[in-house]
Image: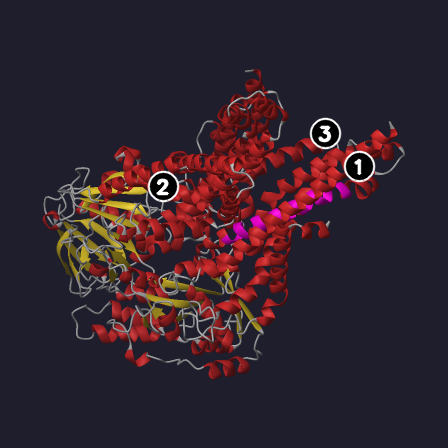
């Protein structure tokens, strides 16, 4: 599947960007030329040989803050999508197997979460539950979990109704075995799509919350935090927001493109499978 | 008509449990947050005794379920209680705020429909040419821009540099339609980017798919004019997904108001939500959430009705 | 597509035409549009003596006012005098005034207000009124106040912060008054939508109405700090509060930046009842680790000054003797911590603040340099633990008080709201402040006694003062200059146009 994604030009670029960003998250903090928390007397300076992107309102080196912040930003949005994954996929798959009551309850919960204007809810819950990054991540993750719930449920349903699963169940296979053996295979591609999508959403939402002053935990740098701070000092460094904005946009774009690429590839794979099958059928006939 | 009715029933069947769950979750927020009206009111002069007295006055020392049912029966009557922060009637504040937010969201929706359909149709009509690629690229670009950056950039360019629109504030329509609209333009544009790009992309793929359908080929063979083919067959069959997306965008428009209203200083729904949440004004936050659920459901209902009317496929229940 | 573009362009032009029309609706009436955080409470008793009194002063007149030198001058009270002992004061009201609901402004109204401020259960003012024993309406215009102690600060105390007088009839229902003010101030509220806007018009019955030159005031909910300046620049607002980081933007836009004189002081609040601050050496380390100039440079952008006392250094109660008692000296701070038995990094403490602010990050890095690890916790519900004195470390910025004695007791008194270490008070403070309180304001010893009280107060381990950031406003050049009254906005003489 990965090779197929890399065959698409958009897939190549997306993977390239994401690879670069993951690399930043991994080694960025070591590349930082200065201590990202260490302020200096020279505040809100423009770009120079010593500080390529200038300094922020405490005189901290912006390059170092962006490099160092890449880890928290990336881990943060991955955390969002992992929370969403766990909160979505498990009930999504189980809703098919655990009976009508569980199915009804989970479906209604998913409907509810979808219906909520989620930035409003994210703001409300994060602020009310104590204003920290974990609270914000957790809230946003739960709010976008229906995405995972729906795709995993749909895929599971399609599998559950297929003859070979029925056969397995008739043959006395346990639910756990069926899920591991048959369902996962079908469920994984749409989950990969949703994972890429939610990581992008996580990026945007968390930076929006940061802008509103919610879920902020100074002095640790994040891209959203650097951007929000830059917007407050526009008259000193009018060009400054461009860099963190570009980083956020590139990441979100890469996540979305990767999601599209996976969808294209797996969709194609599915079609290829279908064509092969119908060819088999015709051959047999 | 039958489709309409069943759609209505289906929506209501979804709405009732959603409403119950949402209200319960929202109400449980207070218990989870451990916030109290006492400190909002007393500030510097809070002592444990006065705090207990105030909490008793608000009935917060009663069992949780009693409080919930009490609150819920008031909500059903349209009474969302009073704010811990300033003692104001929350229903009234939300009504005033919703007018502003819905004005902005409405205009954003119009912009989303006009430009989304414009770009989507153009890209589909010129599919696989540079126009298509340019539009698709541009749509992708604007869809990943954080809305607060868009908002501030719009203020800098269109309000400060060009002076075309006021940079902030809201003027009620009674004070003049033009002034009212002028104040809505920038926030609505900032809010609409996401909708424009999603509608355009969905419409493009929907239309491109519709052009491939047999009945379109049939129509071309029958010698119908391209215009007739487009409006009669392609558009009606290809815009379903775009309309659905439009329906799903509404919660986003309402949610995005949190950011845009803060930038543009509009005392709407979103700002009310953010302010109340940050102040720990729990009844106000609960009110916001209840009203937003209702608004979203009503809007989905409307979209379903339109969908049934406009696209043949959804009338058939596809 | 071309037609489409044309249509859009036309629409834009049409709308911008309208916008221009709105900005220039040059009726004869002059309107001041002020972008503010709208007050939550309109009952002065509930609103308290914090910053919101500036907005409430549109609707309420107060018993006294202050002038540019910070001295009490007549307002609703035309004159006043003390008895010889200084434990009784009589205010003489102006005659023939009435509240906007037609009720007379008389001694009974003043009595009703002060008694309510002392007894109403959600009063935010009762702590300010401990000197007041009884209030008597001796005649229609004479209010006699008997005091619990000799206190010459009363005329300063009963100014805009503590004695904005509402109509007693309206105050019979405090909840209603809290939503809609009824006073005898320069303006009357005509429309009030909480959280959205408040419209006021000129009150012809205000005692100094002849000097009120504005016909209408519109209070509008303020946008994000990043777009406030553009709001004033494009004419949406005439006046708004300004954060120091936007001074440059305001000046670049050719707007007026108003640096209001005042008594502001920011501090680091310490709770000596909690670890590790129960060790005086740790407190001393914090004192020596604090570099005030960094706050001036990075928080105030040069608009403020460093101060190590609860007011700026040009204030009359500022004690030169105590200046720079604990100079900035990181090495000494480290040594003190070592003496107290702490290795660098041993001490971990939460700094709890209501909203993200630069000052907190500066404290974090300065204390960090001395070896104290500070974790910043942003808690919107910060006021609860702060005023319940449950925090170990926090920060506070006061706008100061007209009465210097009130400022001192608020910070250093055993129950002072800004004393995070309640019930602690420094030794000798109580006696020193009593002396200052009982010194007549025109006595030659007044300043000396105030400074002695400050000196005694500064022994408090509960507070380390950092910098003084005056209140900042940005205004359109068409609004005339404000009278330079310390900490207050006065509406008399102000013009828009």
Packing grade of label 1 (10 A; few <14, some 14-19, many >=20) is few
Per the image, the residue denoted by label 1 is A276
SS at circle 3: helix
| Magenta-colored span | A185-207
Residue under circle 3?
Answer: A100
* Nearer to the camera, A66 or B25: A66
C-beta proximity under 8 Å, tags 3 and 2: no
User: Residue B255: x, y in percent?
Assistant: 48, 42
Label 3 packing within 10 angstroms: few (<14), some (14-19), many (20+)? few
Q: Residues within 10 Å of mark 2 (few under 14, many from 20)?
A: many
Tell me residue B20's x, y (percent). Answer: 57, 31
- Taking the image as shown, residue C243 lies to the left or right of residue A134, namely left
Asked if the stretch drawn in magenta spans residue A187, the answer is yes
Q: Quadrant of residue B79?
A: top left
**Residue C77: x, y in percent?**
15, 53
Q: Which residue is mark 2?
A: B185
Q: Is residue C399 visible?
A: no
Residue beneath the point at 58% across and 61% down: A72
Most extreme residue toward the right is A171
- Res. C428 in view: yes
Chain containing the residue with disc 1 = A
């Amino acid at each position: 599947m990965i090779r197929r994604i890399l065959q698409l030009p958009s897939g190549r670029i997306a993977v390239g960007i994401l690879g670069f960003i993951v690399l930043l998250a991994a080694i960025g903090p070591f590349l930082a030329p200065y201590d990202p928390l260490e302020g200096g007397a020279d505040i809100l300076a423009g770009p120079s040989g010593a500080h390529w992107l200038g300094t922020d309102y405490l005189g901290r080196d912006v390059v170092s803050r962006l490099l160092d912040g890449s880890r928290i930003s990336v881990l943060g949005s991955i955390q969002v999508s992992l929370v969403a994954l766990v909160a979505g996929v498990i009930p999504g798959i189980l809703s098919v197997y655990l009976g009508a009551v569980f199915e009804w309850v989970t479906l209604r919960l998913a409907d509810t979460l979808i219906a909520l204007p989620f930035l409003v809810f994210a703001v409300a819950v994060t602020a009310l539950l104590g204003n920290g990054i974990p609270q914000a991540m957790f809230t946003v993750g739960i709010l976008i979990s229906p995405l995972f719930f729906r795709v995993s449920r749909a895929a599971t349903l399609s599998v559950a109704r297929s003859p070979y699963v029925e056969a397995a169940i008739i043959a006395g296979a346990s639910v756990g075995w069926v899920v591991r053996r048959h369902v996962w295979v079908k469920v994984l591609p749409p989950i990969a799509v949703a994972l890429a999508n939610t990581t992008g959403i996580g990026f945007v939402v968390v930076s929006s919350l940061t802008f509103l002053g919610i879920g902020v935990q100074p002095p640790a740098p994040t891209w959203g935090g650097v951007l929000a701070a830059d917007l407050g000092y526009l008259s000193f460094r009018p060009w400054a927001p461009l860099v963190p904005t570009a980083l956020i946009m590139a990441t979100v774009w890469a996540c979305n493109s990767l999601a599209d690429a996976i969808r294209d590839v797996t969709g194609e794979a599915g079609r290829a499978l279908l064509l092969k099958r119908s060819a088999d059928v015709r051959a047999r006939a | 008509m039958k489709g309409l009715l069943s759609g209505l029933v289906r929506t209501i069947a979804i709405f009732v449990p959603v409403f119950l769950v949402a209200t319960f979750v929202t109400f449980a927020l207070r218990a989870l947050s451990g916030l109290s009206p006492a400190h909002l009111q007393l500030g510097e002069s809070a002592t444990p005794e006065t705090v207990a007295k105030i909490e008793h006055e608000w009935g917060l020392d009663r069992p949780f379920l009693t409080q919930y049912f009490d609150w819920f029966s008031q909500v059903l009557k349209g009474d969302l209680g009073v704010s811990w922060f300033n003692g104001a009637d929350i229903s009234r504040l939300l009504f005033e705020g919703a007018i502003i937010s819905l004005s902005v969201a409405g205009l954003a929706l119009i912009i989303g429909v006009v430009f989304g359909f414009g770009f989507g149709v153009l890209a589909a009509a010129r599919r696989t040419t540079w126009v298509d690629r340019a539009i698709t690229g541009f749509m992708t670009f604007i869809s990943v821009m954080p809305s607060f950056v868009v908002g501030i950039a719009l203020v800098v360019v269109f309000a400060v540099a060009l002076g075309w629109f006021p940079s902030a504030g809201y003027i009620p329509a009674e004070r003049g339609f033009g002034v009212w609209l002028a104040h809505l333009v920038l926030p609505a544009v900032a809010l609409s980017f996401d909708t424009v790009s999603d509608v355009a992309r969905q419409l493009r793929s929907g239309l491109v798919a519709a052009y491939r359908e047999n009945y379109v080929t049939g129509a071309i063979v029958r010698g119908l004019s391209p215009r007739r083919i487009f409006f009669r067959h392609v558009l009606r069959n290809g815009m379903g997904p775009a309309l659905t997306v439009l329906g799903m965008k509404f919660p986003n428009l309402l949610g995005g108001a949190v950011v845009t209203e803060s930038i543009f200083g509009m005392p709407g729904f979103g700002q009310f939500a953010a302010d109340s949440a940050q102040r720990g004004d729990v009844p106000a936050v609960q009110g916001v959430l209840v009203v937003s659920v209702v608004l979203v459901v009503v809007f989905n209902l409307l979209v379903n009705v339109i969908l049934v009317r406009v696209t043949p496929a959804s009338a058939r229940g596809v | 597509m071309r037609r489409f573009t044309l249509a859009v362009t036309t629409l834009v032009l049409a709308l911008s035409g309208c916008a221009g029309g709105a900005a220039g609706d040059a009726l004869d009436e002059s309107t001041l549009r002020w972008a503010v955080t709208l007050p939550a409470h309109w009952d002065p008793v509930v609103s308290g003596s914090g910053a919101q009194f500036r907005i409430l002063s549109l609707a309420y007149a107060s018993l006294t006012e202050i002038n540019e030198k910070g001295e009490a001058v007549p307002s609703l009270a035309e004159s006043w005098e003390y008895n010889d002992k200084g434990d009784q004061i009589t205010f003489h009201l102006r005659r023939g005034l009435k509240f906007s609901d037609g009720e007379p402004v008389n001694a009974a109204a003043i009595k009703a207000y002060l008694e309510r401020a002392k007894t109403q259960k959600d009063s935010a003012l009762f702590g300010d009124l401990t000197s007041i024993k009884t209030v008597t309406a001796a005649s229609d215009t004479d209010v006699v106040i008997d005091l619990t102690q000799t206190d010459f600060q009363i005329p300063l105390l009963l100014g805009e912060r503590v004695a904005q007088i509402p109509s007693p009839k309206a105050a019979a229902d405090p909840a209603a008054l809290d939503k809609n003010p009824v006073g005898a101030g320069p303006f009357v509220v005509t429309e009030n939508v909480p959280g959205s806007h408040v419209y006021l018009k000129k009150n012809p019955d205000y005692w100094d109405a002849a000097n009120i030159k504005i016909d209408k005031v519109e209070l509008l909910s303020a946008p994000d700090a990043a777009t406030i300046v553009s709001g004033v620049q494009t004419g949406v607002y005439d006046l708004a509060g300004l954060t120091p980081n936007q001074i440059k933007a305001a000046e670049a836009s050719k707007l007026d930046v108003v640096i209001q004189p005042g008594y502001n002081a920011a501090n680091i609040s310490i709770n000596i009842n909690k670890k590790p601050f129960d060790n005086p050496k740790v407190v001393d380390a914090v004192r020596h680790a604090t570099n005030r100039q960094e706050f001036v440079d990075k928080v105030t952008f040069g608009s403020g000054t460093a101060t190590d006392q609860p007011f700026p250094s040009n204030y009359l109660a500022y004690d030169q003797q105590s200046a720079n008692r604990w100079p900035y000296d990181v090495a000494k701070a480290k040594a003190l911590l070592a003496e107290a038995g702490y290795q660098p990094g041993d001490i971990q403490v939460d700094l709890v603040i209501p909203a993200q602010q630069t000052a907190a990050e500066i404290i974090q890095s300065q204390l960090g340099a001395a070896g104290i690890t500070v974790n910043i916790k942003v808690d919107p519900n910060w006021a609860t633990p702060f005023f319940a004195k449950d925090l170990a470390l926090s920060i506070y910025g006061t706008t100061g008080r007209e009465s210097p004695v009130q400022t001192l007791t608020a910070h250093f008194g055993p129950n002072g709201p800004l004393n995070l270490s309640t019930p602690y008070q420094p030794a000798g403070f109580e006696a020193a402040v009593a002396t200052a309180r009982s010194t007549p304001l025109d006595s030659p010893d007044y300043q000396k006694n105030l400074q002695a009280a400050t000196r005694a107060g500064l022994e408090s381990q509960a507070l380390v003062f950092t910098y003084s950031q005056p209140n900042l406003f940005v205004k359109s050049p068409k609004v005339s200059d404000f009278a330079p009254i310390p900490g207050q906005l006065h509406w008399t003489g102000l013009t828009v146009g």
